[in-house]
Structures are given as C-alpha cells and as structure tokens.
Image (tube, grey):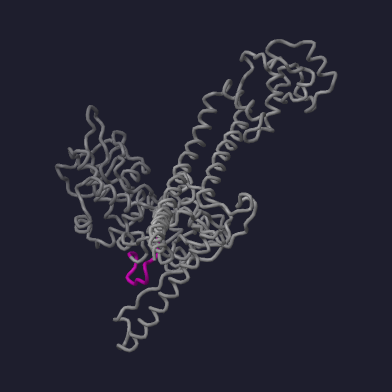
Amino acid sequence: MEATLNQTAVKDITMVAISAIRPNGFNPRKHFDEVSLNELAESIRQQGILQPVTVRPIADSNDYELVFGERRYRAATIVGMQEIPAIINDLSDEEAEEIAITENLQRKDVTPMEEANAYQRLMESGRHDLSSLAVQFGKSEAYIRTRLKFASLIPEIAALLETDEITVSVASEICRYGEDIQREVYEQHLKEDVTYSSWRGQKASEIARSIERQYTADLDRYSFDKTLCLSCPHNTNNMSLFCEGCGKCANRTCLAEMNASYLVEKTLQVLAENPTATLGHTDYDYNLIAVERLMAMGHEVESAMPYGTAYPRQPEAPEKEDYDNEEAYETACSDYEQEQSDYRERCAEIHRQSENGEISLYVKIGSNNITLCYVKKNNTADDTTQGQPLSPVEKLEKQDKRNKEIALEKTIEDTKKQILNIDVAEAKFGADEDRMVYFFLLSSLRRENFALLGISEEHSPYLNDEDKMNIIANLTAKTKAVIRRDYLIAQFKDAYRNNATADLMLDFARKHMPNELAEIEDGYNQIYEKRHQRIEERKAAIVAKEKPTDENDDAAEASSEDAKPEEAAA
C-alpha cells in the first residue's frame, strides 16, 4: 500500500522505506495502548499520515533511526505501508535523545513512570535542572519534583502505578520512603495475594498515616543528639507543613547506626566513671548492635541481668524564666537545694554499700539508652575467699581468669566442628594412633565412610560383629587410617576446656587442620586480649582511687608517732 501525505509538499519531507527505519531507545513511552494504536491505523488507512516522523541517518549504513513519531510508525506498519513520510535530521546522540524525550512528554497518554524516567534522564544529562525542566514543559517545579521521586519506586510498586492499580497520590506518599520500607509496604499491603491487610483502594491520606504509624520511629524516644535529624529529608517533619516534636525517622538504617553509636559512647563514658561496674542487659529490652560492638572491643557483657534499681538522677536546677513570680522561683530554688542534698546523701549511701560489697553496680544497655543500676548482692562462694568478700581487684582478676577459660572453651567447641569436615584419608598414620584396636574402633565408624570399607548404602547405621570381622579381613593402609581417625573424632566430643581429651584434640587439629585451628585460636585470643586490657585499665583506675586514701593514712600515722615524744615530755 502506498503512503499518502495529506498536506502541501515540503522539501524537507522525504518518503523513507519503513524497512529501513529502526526504533530508538530514547523514547520515554514504553507502553502503547493497542486499541488506540489500531484506531490510529484505521485513521491512516482512511486519511493518510497527517504529520511526518523524524529520523536521523545511521552511520555507515543506508538505514535510519527513529527520533520521534513511534505511534505513527507502528500504525503505518499495521496498515502495511511500505514507505512513510519523514523529516531527516542529522542529530547527535544527545540532541536526538532530548528531542525524543521532549516531543513524547508532550503527548497526553504518557504514564507517570514514563514521565519520571524521562525527567530523570534529562537531569542526568547535565543539560537541565529543576527550573529549566519546569519552564520547558510548562509544569511547576513541585510537579517535576514529584515525578522525579517516582524514579525511586521499587519495580513492583512502579508497575502498580504504571497499570493504574495505585493512584499518583498514593505513589507520591510511598516514594517518600526508602527501598526497605517500600519493600515491606508492597509485600504486606499491596501485593496481589494480600487479602486482610491490603491497602489497595485506600485514599492516599489513609496510606500516608498507616506508613508513618507502622514504619517510622518517633525520634523523641531516642537519646542521641538529633541536630542532624532536623534537616534530614527522612524526618517526617520535613515531609509536611505541620510539625510536632522532633518528628519521626523514615530511614531505619541511619537511625539504628546513630542510636548504636550513641549507646556505645555512653557506655564507655559511664564505665570510665564507675570502673567496678559490670556490663549487662535484660532478656528483652536491649540493643544487639551496641552489645556486639562492645564485646568486639573486649568488654564482657552479661545477658539476662536483673532489672535492679536505677542510680539516682541528679535534680535539674530551676530556670527563673519558667516561673511567674519571684516567690515561686525562690520556693523552687529551696526545693532544689533539698533535692540536691537528698541526692548527694543517696549517692554516698550507694557508694558505701558498693565498697562494703552489699550491692553490685552494673551498666544496663537498653534499646535506646544506658542506665547505671545496682542490685543487692548474695555473698555466695563465688564472691568470697575463705569467707571474706572479694576485693574489686580480685573480682576483676577472677573475671580475667574466666575470660581466658571462655576463650579456650570456645576454641575447643569450634575445633570440634571443624574436625568433622577435614579429609585425612591420605595422611600418614602416626605411631600414637596405631595403638588402637580395629575391631572396637569400628564402633565409631561414620556412616559416610561405610562405602569405603565395602558396606552398601542400604546398610543399617550400625555395624554388627560379622560386618566388622569382614572389614578387618580386608584392611588396607587407607582403610586403617579412616577407622582409627573416625574413632578419635568420636572421642573428641568429650573435649572440654583443658581436660586431657581437649589437649589430644588440639594436637590432632594442629596436625591435620593447622590453618583452621590457628584462625579459631586467633579469633578468641584477640577477644581475650581486648578484655584483658580493659580489666587492667579498670584495675589501675581502682588502685589510683584508693592510693590517696592510703597516703593520707600513712601521713596521719607518721604525725601520731611524732607527737608521742612531746606527750611523754609533757
């Protein structure tokens, strides 16, 4: 069928073979409605093509690349035209892309996601900013900004917007949040198979409130410095005109990092002020990230600590501007002085009880804060030496010894696991291993080695006496090694701390898996060294605090001795 151009001939318009035209990748429109496309094809069949397409030459060929006019090109293909009227322009890649995007964005059937991706590409080209895009397309900057945010939607939600399963207003609310929150919103509320908790069909305002309630955290609940949060785009205060309190955080990764960093720093500060205190947390209310970081630094952190009693909080001094008159302010100051006196008295009593071993101080790591607490002590055998309470230094030395034991216990436990994975079938059998008797050793043969000794896979998990006798009759050097080592591995389950079995197992590991054992030992020894260093620092702090008292006692005793001759003379 011949193409018809229903307009006055223009010298720049050329008939180009449709087979010589290649679509481009610049077009922001990726979806073409079939009904609309067929209607355009029927119009072309009746009236011809009213407006030419634009193409550019493809280098080193006789073909052309379509710049814009893809709907006309597709409709002409449906009609069966051999040629199509076209304007041939020699354009660079950048010029072709910008023209294609600009022309297609002015069509009415461009989807919001197609707009978003097109604006994003124009911004990334470096030739446009928000203001120039608003001027070029006759849109407000707020409109362009909203469309640009759509480019951050996860593919699943973008597809829902593309197919009109969610509205532009709903997408505008969702795109304010990061990928993690978007993913949860989709999986829990927008996915097709979600029923009871589905948000499909809800108003944008309802979804906005639901997201804020379920997926953001109230910053007022956290104790870290929130100066940076005031200007953060993930603060809900910066997402709306009406603000209350510190706002809510929609960036959970950043929130978790700032909170954990604060908790670690606060813990170290409280420990420095109270070197005899231990670290711990309750079963449920604690920050795992902070606990892991403190343990990696060498601190011992006890789990399932009792709730205890919080250390008294220092009273806050009254501010004069908070009171209506001078009398009320003076009354508040008087109350404050009494509160200060009570606070100092209470702290002194806690300090006395701590020194006498009546209570224990510990730093409780909570979810969002650090609290210095104390609990009454039960003087068990673990806390005494020959009936006498342990001194703070002795307690730390005892803890240091236990930490060393823990490092060895952990090394043994991990070594047990690694030994099961090693291959020692080809290794030379030592003289110490040769003392073992094969018949009894076969009781410990692992099932995965049955086939090596001629036992079928269908055999029961246990060998009977006849099986063992048959195996012994056909032993080779390799099968001997397998049997003996399987026996040793079976016995290593009883390895514990520094018992003889543990020593044998570690010797075995040094021979057959030296690299793995070295890695295990290094890991736990590094933790011990860090903990050892912390304990030495805390011991030094305790000794430093006690030293001035000892010196004063010595000076007083010396003064008393000097006074005796005078008293005698008198």
Is residue 162 visible in the rendered image? The answer is no
Residue at image position (73%, 25%) is 447
Q: Is residue 93 left or right of residue 461?
A: left
Q: Is residue 546 left or right of residue 51?
A: right
The residue closer to the viewer here, 376 or 206, is 376
The residue closer to the viewer here, 443 or 176, is 443
Is residue 434 visible in the rendered image? The answer is yes
In percent of width and height, residue 78 lies at: 38, 43
Q: Is residue 29 left or right of residue 51?
A: right
What residue occupies the far right of the structure in this picture?
A: 466
Residue at image position (36%, 43%) is 79
In percent of width and height, residue 247 lies at: 38, 66
What residue occupies the far front of the structure in this picture?
A: 569
Quarter that holds the C terminus: bottom left
Quarter that holds the N terminus: top left
Q: Does the magenta stretch include residue 243?
A: yes
In percent of width and height, residue 250 lies at: 40, 59
The residue closer to the viewer here, 32 or 490, is 490
The residue closer to the viewer here, 331 or 215, is 331
Q: What stretch is highlighted in magenta?
A: 238-249
Residue at image position (79%, 13%) is 472
Image position of 272 with respect to 460: above or below = below
In percent of width and height, residue 535 lies at: 47, 46
Instruction: Determine the main secondary structure of the stretch shown in magenta.
Output: loop
Q: Is residue 237 magenta?
A: no
How many numbered marks are there? Answer: 0
